[in-house]
């Protein structure tokens, strides 16, 4: 499992939340909301379109909007749509596939931590993380 969340994945989660909050947004407006460039918005949104979370409508009246699947997507769903699976099957210590039969020194602790992290990300709705964040602070 990777330990980092890339900038693309971070912006993808923010994009889903922004589209849930604002409805349809053009690329330039979404770039402004995300504090990035329209070119980077395309890199962030394309995997979400491919995953079926976001609809892309071309043309002067087009823009991006959430699909039903995007409204139901979790933070984990969005991160994995952009960055790929979080569980790569690789050992975090040794450069080999992870195996319970030949565990490394961190195998048990890492498996527990990964289970907690993935569970938390899978339980957090991507479309509502801003609302959730406001109510917990």
Image (cartoon, grey):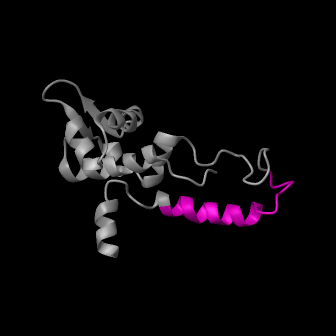
User: Visible in this render: residue 97?
Assistant: yes
Residue 2, position as x, y percentages in the image: 61, 50
* Rendered residue at 34%/68% (across/down): 133
User: Nearest the camera: 119 or 117?
Assistant: 117
The single residue placed furthest to the top in the displayed view is 59
Magenta residue check for 55: no
User: Visible in this render: residue 71?
Assistant: no
Q: Quadrant of the C terminus?
A: bottom left
Residue 103, position as x, y percentages in the image: 83, 57
Main SS of the magenta segment? helix
User: Nearest the camera: 101 or 25?
Assistant: 25
Q: Is residue 2 above or below residue 120?
A: above
Q: Quadrant of residue 43?
A: top left
Q: Is residue 76 left or right of residue 43?
A: right
Residue 92, position as x, y percentages in the image: 72, 53
Highlighted range, magenta: 99-120
* Rendered residue at 58%/48% (across/down): 86
Q: Is residue 96 left or right of residue 78?
A: right
């Amino acid at each position: 499992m990777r330990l980092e969340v890339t900038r693309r994945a971070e912006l993808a989660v923010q994009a889903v939340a922004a589209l849930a909050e604002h409805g349809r947004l053009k690329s330039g407006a979404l770039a402004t909301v995300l504090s990035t460039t329209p070119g980077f918005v395309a890199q962030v949104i394309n995997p979400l379109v491919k995953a079926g979370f976001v609809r892309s409508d071309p043309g002067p009246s087009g823009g991006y909007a959430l699909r039903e699947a995007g409204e139901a997507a979790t933070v984990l769903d969005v991160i994995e749509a952009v960055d790929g699976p979080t569980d790569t099957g690789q050992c975090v210590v040794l450069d080999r596939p992870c195996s319970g039969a030949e565990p490394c020194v961190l195998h048990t602790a890492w498996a527990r931590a990964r289970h907690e992290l993935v569970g938390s990300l899978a339980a957090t709705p991507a479309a509502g993380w801003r609302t959730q964040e406001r109510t917990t602070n």
